[in-house]
Image (cartoon, grey):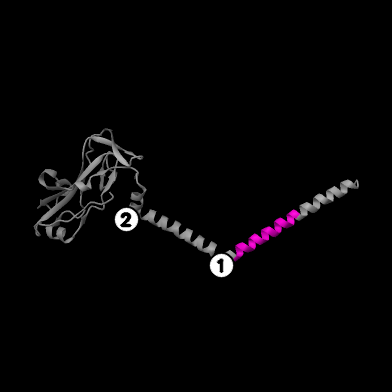
Amino acid sequence: MFPTVKVRLTGLDPAASYIVFLDIIPVDDKRYRYVYHSSQWMVAGSGDPPLPHNLYVHPDSPATGQLWMAQGVVAFDKLKLTNNRKPLVRGQVSLHSMHKYLPRVHILQTKDLDTPPEQQARVDQALTYTFPETTFTTVTAYQNQQITRLKIASNPFAKGFREASRSRQYFKRMMAAMYNSPKETAARETRIKQRAVIENFSAERETISNNDRRLRKSIGIK
């Protein structure tokens, strides 16, 4: 998920254990489309029913309140979104494309350190926090090229794109440097002069050949 949801936790019992998890709920029951000429989202019809797999437990759960607060920023940077009805790998949340969603962060105190946190995560038993500024619209392709460049530059999962981009830029710089170096410039000028000489020589040969044919014809020689 990009940008990543990040929160700071304070006021927890340092000695108690907590499970921190996140779910993503629909903002409304509508489906949207992006209108390019006005650069805005418009309602395109009724939305699809919410998918059931929309809960993600932070991988550090459970942890003591002291550890959660000592982290400074708790980031859900391993969360991945998919439009598959059922997640294919762990850590994915299933959402519909072209719908508006709001992430919710939940904090659940627990004394059970044996049961997997995914089985303990209950929204109705947890403290829930929402941030309206984190509302987003799901897309399968970014509608804004600046966002695409920002993700490639900032998203750790886009390392391959950054390396490919740097390789292309390096290749262009090297080619430009080679092409504009004094040695290459002199060689290029030499090739141009040689080509001009060859072209002049070919033209002269063509002229001589034409004159020879006219002379032969005038004296009756085939």
Residue underneath mark 2 = 154
Residue underneath mark 1 = 182
Q: Is residue 75 magenta?
A: no
Q: Can you give x and y, in whole percent of width and height, for residue 143 in the image?
A: 34, 44
Point out the residue furthest to the front here. Answer: 38
Q: Say whether residue 8 is visible.
A: yes
User: Which residue type carries mark 2?
Assistant: Ser
The magenta region covers 186-203
Classify residue 164 by image quadrant: bottom left
Q: Is residue 164 left or right of residue 57?
A: right
Label 2 CA crowd tier, 10 Å (few <14, some 14–19, many 20+): some
144 w.r.t. 73: above or below? above
Q: Is residue 168 left or right of residue 96?
A: right
Q: Residue at x 66, y 61 (%)?
A: 193
Q: Main secondary structure of the magenta part?
A: helix
Q: Secondary structure at mark 1?
A: helix
User: CA separation, marks 1 and 2?
Assistant: 39 Å
User: Which residue type carries mark 1?
Assistant: Pro
Q: Looking at the image, do the residues carrying marks 1 and 2 touch, with CB atoms under 8 Å apart? A: no
Q: Nearer the viewer, residue 156 or 56?
A: 156
